[in-house]
Image (cartoon, rainbow, N blue to C red):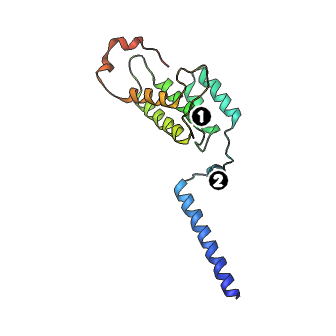
Amino acid sequence: MWQKVVQIIGLVVTVVYALVIVWLYATEPRSFREVANGAQVAAGTYQVDQAKFDAALALFRREQFRAARDEWQSADPAQSDPKTQFYIAYSFYREGWGRVYYDQDLFKQGLEAVNRAIALAPAPLTVADENLQMLTAAELKAELEQGTERNWGDINPLKVMRQRK
């Protein structure tokens, strides 16, 4: 009798251990903090650090885009909040936008962030911020995709009259 109980307990412990190993392999955490964040996301208790988010938003409005992105990334280390990922993508757009040319690398990173935001949002993502001209993730994605494409319009001298959104 006891032999069967020990075997069942051993089997259950082995299966749980295997699931933990697979989860760690799949999420690839680099620190115990990332493991804790991943567990919070899985449990549905993850929240963005609102103080850091607000500090980043203040930096964004002062056009300090890199510093704002750093704050947002520390406010959302699990990259699981669609609104934060939207603002990160918008900061890449604003920093990469130029009157004569667009910074392709920044626009590509912005596309990655906006795609994360779209994937995380349960419905079409819309941000209520009167300081932004693009309020949906779809608009931002279209603008970033347009900026990464190379075409003859890139050499148009009237492009310098275009307004940043």
The answer to whether residue 135 is above or below residue 79 is above
The residue pinned by badge 1 equals 83
Q: Residue 101 lies in what quarter of the image?
A: top left
Under tag 1, what secondary structure?
helix
Residue drawn 71% across the image and 86% down it? 2
Where residue 45 sits in the image (x, y, percent)? 69, 47
Q: Residues within 10 Å of mark 1 (few under 14, many from 20)?
A: some
The residue pinned by badge 2 equals 39
Residue drawn 50% across the image and 29% down it? 92
Residue drawn 47% across the image and 38% down it? 112
Under tag 2, what secondary structure?
helix
Q: CA distance from mark 1 to mark 2?
A: 20 Å
In the rendering, which numbered label is found on residue 27?
none
The answer to whether residue 114 is above or below residue 42 is above
Where residue 32 sits in the image (x, y, percent)? 64, 53
Between disc 1 and disc 2, the foreground one is 1
**Residue that lies at the very extreme toward the front in this rendered image:** 123
Total residue callouts? 2
Residue type at the position of mark 2: Ala
Q: Residue 105 lies in what quarter of the image?
A: top left
Q: Residue 67 lies in what quarter of the image?
A: top right
Asked if the residues shown at circle 1 and circle 2 are in contact, with their CB atoms under 8 angstroms apart, the answer is no
Question: Considering depth in this image, is 160 or 140 the residue closer to the camera?
Answer: 140
Where residue 19 sits in the image (x, y, percent)? 58, 64
Q: Earlier in the sequence, mark 1 or mark 2?
A: 2
Residue type at the position of mark 1: Lys
Question: Considering depth in this image, is 58 or 123 the residue closer to the camera?
Answer: 123
The answer to whether residue 31 is above or below residue 68 is below
Question: Considering depth in this image, is 8 or 94 the residue closer to the camera?
Answer: 8
Residue drawn 56% across the image and 37% down it? 123
Q: Quadrant of the N terminus?
A: bottom right
Q: Residues within 10 Å of mark 2 (few under 14, many from 20)?
A: few
